[in-house]
Image (spheres, grey):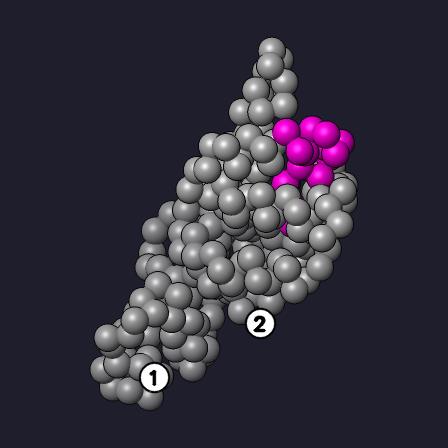
């Protein structure tokens, strides 16, 4: 059963998370009905997920056969060892993370203008320093390339978000975890503490 304390309902927070990420996992099914998971880059804009690739290949064949798909994005902030809160039991060991899963229909984008706009969003995310000619559907240099690339839109019918940062812990257990993170001082430990403060019901400031 899904833990309610980890669910995030605020659309703004979910959008901010998705727009800050660039990598996700597409779930489809193959001709035999087996699940297929494809890692790929994406952009999230106007409430939809977009990715691009070849018109051929297993991923596109799966989408044409069954356009109902799922798409998951996750970002692991920190591994939480059991000894942060219990000196003996392994049970408290966990990870803190943000994740979003969407279920919906994958659609082939036909409009060259929409393709150009989406691919421009990709470039802003993956190559923010620039160094390329703007992608314009009317530019003869880009026109054949836009025709040759497949751009897929996923329109979510259901979207769930889970941000896990110790919301289920009692105050003393939370303090032990934040103390352990502060003492370890790993790459994202300070950021994780801030997320715990943001989402934990015991934090008042």
Tell me the crowding category of disc 1: few under 14, some 14 to 19, or many 20 or more residues within 10 angstroms, Cα based. Answer: some
Which mark identifies residue 136? Answer: 1
Determine if the magenta segment contains residue 175.
yes
Secondary structure state at the residue bearing disc 2? loop
Q: For this rendering, which residue is in front, 190 or 74?
A: 190
Which residue is disc 2 drawn over?
46
Q: Residue at x 24, y 75 (%)?
A: 131
Q: For this rendering, which residue is in front, 158 or 88?
A: 88
Relative to 82, is 5 above or below?
Answer: below
- State the extent of the magenta-drawn residues as a range: 161-176
Task: Judge left or right: residue 145 versus residue 181.
Answer: left
Mark before the other along the chain sequence, 2 or 1: 2
Q: Position of residue 72 (x, y in %)?
A: 54, 48
C-alpha gap between disc 2 and disc 1 = 20 Å
Q: Residue at x 38, y 47 (%)?
A: 58
Q: Residue at x 47, y 47 (%)?
A: 25
């Amino acid at each position: 059963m899904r833990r309610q304390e980890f669910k995030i309902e605020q659309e703004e927070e979910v959008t901010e998370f998705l727009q800050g990420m660039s990598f996700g996992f597409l779930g489809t099914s193959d001709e035999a009905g087996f699940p297929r998971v494809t890692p790929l880059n994406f952009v999230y804009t106007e409430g939809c997920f977009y990715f691009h690739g070849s018109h051929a290949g297993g991923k596109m064949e799966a989408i044409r056969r069954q356009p109902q798909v799922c798409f998951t994005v996750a970002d692991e902030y920190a591994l939480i060892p059991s000894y942060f809160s219990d000196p003996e039991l392994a049970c408290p060991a966990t990870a803190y993370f943000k994740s979003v899963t969407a279920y919906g229909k994958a659609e082939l984008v036909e409009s060259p203008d929409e393709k150009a706009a989406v691919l421009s969003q990709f470039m802003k995310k993956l190559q923010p320093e620039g160094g390329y000619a703007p992608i314009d559907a009317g530019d003869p240099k880009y026109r054949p390339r836009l025709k040759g690339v497949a751009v897929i839109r996923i329109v979510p019918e259901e979207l769930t978000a889970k941000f896990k940062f110790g919301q289920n812990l009692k105050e003393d257990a939370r303090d032990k975890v934040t103390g352990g993170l502060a003492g370890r001082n790993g790459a994202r430990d300070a950021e994780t503490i801030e997320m715990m403060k943001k989402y934990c019901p015991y934090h008042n400031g």
